Amino acid sequence: MTKPRSWTRFFLCLLFAFLLVVGQAEWPLMAQDTQAPLAPLEIQEYPVTLDGEVLFEVRQGIGSFTPEERAAAIQRRILQVAEDEDIPIDSITIKRVGDRDNVTVVQGNRPLITVTKADVGDRLESQEEVAIELAQRIREAITRYRQDRVPQNLLKNTVFAVLTTILTLILCSVIIRISGKIFPPLSRWGGERIPPLRLQNFEIISRETVERWLLRILQFTRLALLLFILYLYLTFVFNLFPWTRTFGKNFLNHFLGSLEFILTSIGNYLPNLVAIAVIVAITYYILKGVRAIFYAIETERLVIPGFYTDWAKPTYNLLQILIIALAAVVVFPYLPGFDSPAFRGISVFLGILFSLGSTSAIANVVGGVILIYTRSFQVGDLIQIGDVKGIVVQKTLLVTRICAFNNQVITVPNSSLLNSTVINYAVAIREMGQPLILQTTITLGYDVPWRDVYEAMIEAGRRTTGILDDPPPFVLQTALNDYHIAYELNVYTRNWKGLRYTISELHQNLQDACNEAGIEIMSPSYLALRDGNTSTIPSNYLGDDYLPPGFRITLPK
């Protein structure tokens, strides 16, 4: 079946061609405005028409009538005679009326047109001969005018128009169906016969591109054929009816005039078009060369001291924007209507909108560029910004997206990042080769020996998965408070991606190690009266023979 899209394209083409031809009636006036001042104008001729057919032209006025007013009056009188079917054609004759130097074409006693010596001019014919010729033209035109409006002729022409419309639609449908079936095999056949264009190992024009262009050429040929059929159809149908015959007779002239106007405009614009094509081609190859250089840097085939590989892609994107912007600045003067007030007004309006609405956007872009070249973090790093902690999943010029541990994606503007402290848990491992130090703190009373605490905490660190034995864990006393001592356990790890689970396991092992060593973790501090109270250590660590101490009451001395 024919695809609906093919019918849509067909009817759009019909509509475009119709508007193109109708619009040509105004285009010559537009074209005249753009031309240079002409030489002194020739004598203007005003046609006298009947039913769209030009009978003759009027070049001279008569009396107080201008040539244009005279032509309109003659045309109006002839139309009145043609519409009155009771007036016989033979009543149109010539005779001298009033001034014997002039000959008048009359209908009965009604003057239609007066032929003066000025009308004859340098012609070899006499006034009588010119008048006889004009009378004959008027009689023939009126005869055709009346015959075309006979009901039998109108009915016959209507039937012809309907049949022609049906045949045209059938023909166009057959062309679209047949072409839809044979065009793809023809394009594939041409793609197999035409070799692809290669430059060493780089394929400039592939086989698929050749097939695609061949298919486009065939489709354009089909469109031209359909437009030609449309032209024949409209010319024939418009000539069937007297009300559209004028348009039908001038259809080809309008179409050729439209085509000439388009081709002339393209020809006048061709030098600018060539300049634009050259600028675009140069820009394309510059971008292609720059992309190759930065791709080599990104893949470490090209090493520039001090230029990191993660800078390659964002630097290329920035250069791409700058190169395209520079090319656009160079191309704009060659665009049609660049110097027009409308173009300037739109440019100023867009500039004002961009200036007023892009303040925060520009700040984010600047922040994004600074973050790229300061290398605060990369995609995949674990970072913490204030209360936000998670993995960096996307970094753009405007925002940075962080996936938190609960899979919530947090979008942070780059301008906010620029003014915040960023903690990166991955950069030391990735770039410095140094393991990450995890720290956790517990507080114990002064009655617990600190050596026992050190031993228990270090043992907890060694038991934890992902903790390095070299360098070994160590403990620091960070504070001697009023009621307790703060012990800080420091362990080394390279598994920053599993940081949450490592810290959780470390806390579990701290509880087990302290309980096994008989150390009660009193954090924060509280006051315990041991007389008669059971230890806070879980019972499975105390043993079956454990008994709570009894109450000891002593008298004061």
Image: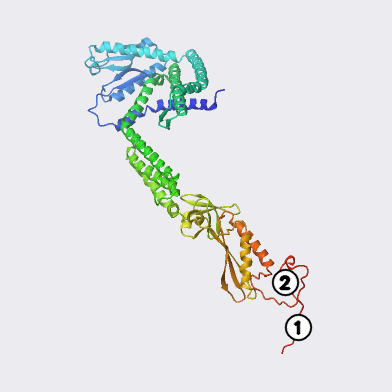
> SS for tag 1?
loop
Toward the front, the furthest residue is 470
Residue depicted at 74% across the width and 72% down the height: 534
Q: How is the image coloured?
A: rainbow
Q: Which mark is residue 535?
A: 2
Is residue 340 in view?
Answer: no
Toward the bottom, the furthest residue is 557
Q: Nearer the viewer, residue 526 or 174?
A: 526
Distance between mark 2 and mark 1 Cα atoms: 19 Å
Residue depicted at 56% across the width and 72% down the height: 479
Which corner quadrant holds the N terminus? top right
Q: Nearer the viewer, residue 174 or 411?
A: 411
Q: Circle 1 is placed at which residue position?
A: 553
Q: Nearer the viewer, residue 84 or 530?
A: 530
Is residue 193 in view?
Answer: yes
Residue depicted at 41% across the width and 49% down the height: 354
Pinpoint residue 502: horizontal percent, then vertical percent: 61, 58
